[in-house]
Amino acid sequence: MMIVAIEGVDGAGKHTLTSRLVEALTAAGRTAATFSFPRYKAGPLGTAVRAMLDGDERLAGLAGSARATAVLFALDRANALPELAARAAGHDVLLVDRYLASNAAYGAARLPADERPEFLAWIAELELTALRLPRPDLQVLLDVPVETARASARQRAVGDATRALDTFERDEGLQERCAAVYRGLAAGGWVAPWIVADRATGAEAVLDALLSGSTRALQSSQSF
Ligand SMILES: Nc1ncnc2c1ncn2[C@@H]1O[C@H](COP(=O)(O)OP(=O)(O)OP(=O)(O)O)[C@@H](O)[C@H]1O
Ligand SMILES: Cc1cn([C@H]2C[C@H](O)[C@@H](COP(=O)(O)O)O2)c(=O)[nH]c1=O
């Protein structure tokens, strides 16, 4: 079993790409399971994540700290480990819509540039070493222009009241910086191999990478 993380700014099309990948993998004779972070419906922690992103004033102290926010997201992932393992069982691929690189990209984008290297090392240590989350075999950066992603998120919000823009989505500067940090993570191979994909060819590119044997992913045999 291999873990493939799908990453990108808000509205990039990660959910859509994840669905297309399930279809493509199934057509190629592989089985795929999916998982998505954050888990807004997972008890008190999920409720707190939702409230924090929605700008609940009572959580302003938490929301104001990039590191405290990152700990909240990381604990959500740690709590999900048994569920992740159960979901992945018996499948060839587990596609995860946002994983620890979301914490790396959004957290770093909220910090001054000179603090980012230390923050990125801290996230890797927190999530992979301290919380023992499985290292992804492959990370996919869905790299679409921020303006395109923003327009998609706005359009989606018009059609679905439950998808109103949250505080991160409304912060245009954050999304721009986040896109730049993501590109740096991919270029530097942060914690695992990356491929950079676009909306048009993303599913085919990821499928090729998974089936061609050119990534470490194919040699992986993850266990939780
Ligand atoms: N390849 C594509 N072509 C056209 N529209 C797309 C494509 N991918 C996504 N979209 C549209 O963009 C919007 C956002 O897509 P999606 O929900 O997949 O993004 P996301 O990255 O998962 O968003 P978020 O991070 O905010 O949850 C949706 O309305 C979707 O229909
Ligand atoms: C998992 C995770 C998420 N975030 C940020 C990224 C997004 O702005 C929101 C989640 O929004 P979505 O529409 O539900 O994708 O939270 C983060 O900063 N760290 C994380 O680990």
Image (tube, rainbow, N blue to C red):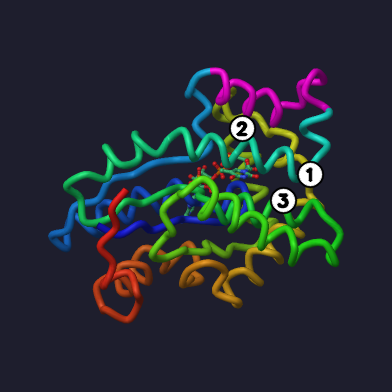
The kind of residue tagged 1 is Asp
The answer to which image quadrant residue 160 occupies is top right
Q: Residue furthest left?
A: 29
The quadrant of the rendered image in which ligand 2 is seen is top right
Q: Mark 1 highlights which residue?
A: 171
User: Where on the picture, by quarter, is residue 24?
Assistant: bottom left
Which residue sits at x=63%, y=26%? 50
Tell me the quarter of the image containing the N terminus: bottom left
Is 46 one of the magenta-colored residues?
yes
In the image, the segment drawn in magenta is 44-60
Q: Helix, strand, or loop for circle 3?
A: helix
The local crowd at label 2, few if under 14, some if 14 to 19, many if 20 or more residues have their Cα within 10 Å, is: some
Q: Nearer the viewer, residue 223 or 181?
A: 223
Q: Are marks 2 and 1 in contact (CB under 8 Å)?
A: no
Task: Say whether residue 67 is left or right of residue 78.
Answer: right
Task: Measure the alpha-carbon separation of dots 2 and 1.
Answer: 15 Å
Q: CA distance from mark 1 to mark 3?
A: 13 Å
- Confirm or reject: label 3 Cβ below 8 Å from ligand 2: yes
Q: Residue at x 48, y 24 (%)?
A: 42
Residue under label 2: 157
* Side (left or right) of 220 relative to 101: left
> Of callouts 2 and 3, which one flags the residue occurring earlier in the amino acid sequence?
3
Q: Position of residue 205 (x, y in %)?
A: 37, 71
Residue most extreme to the front: 130
Q: Residue furthest bottom?
A: 214
Whichever of callouts 2 and 1 sits on the residue coming sooner in the sequence is 2
Q: Which residue is mark 3?
A: 107
Amino acid identity at mark 2? Ala
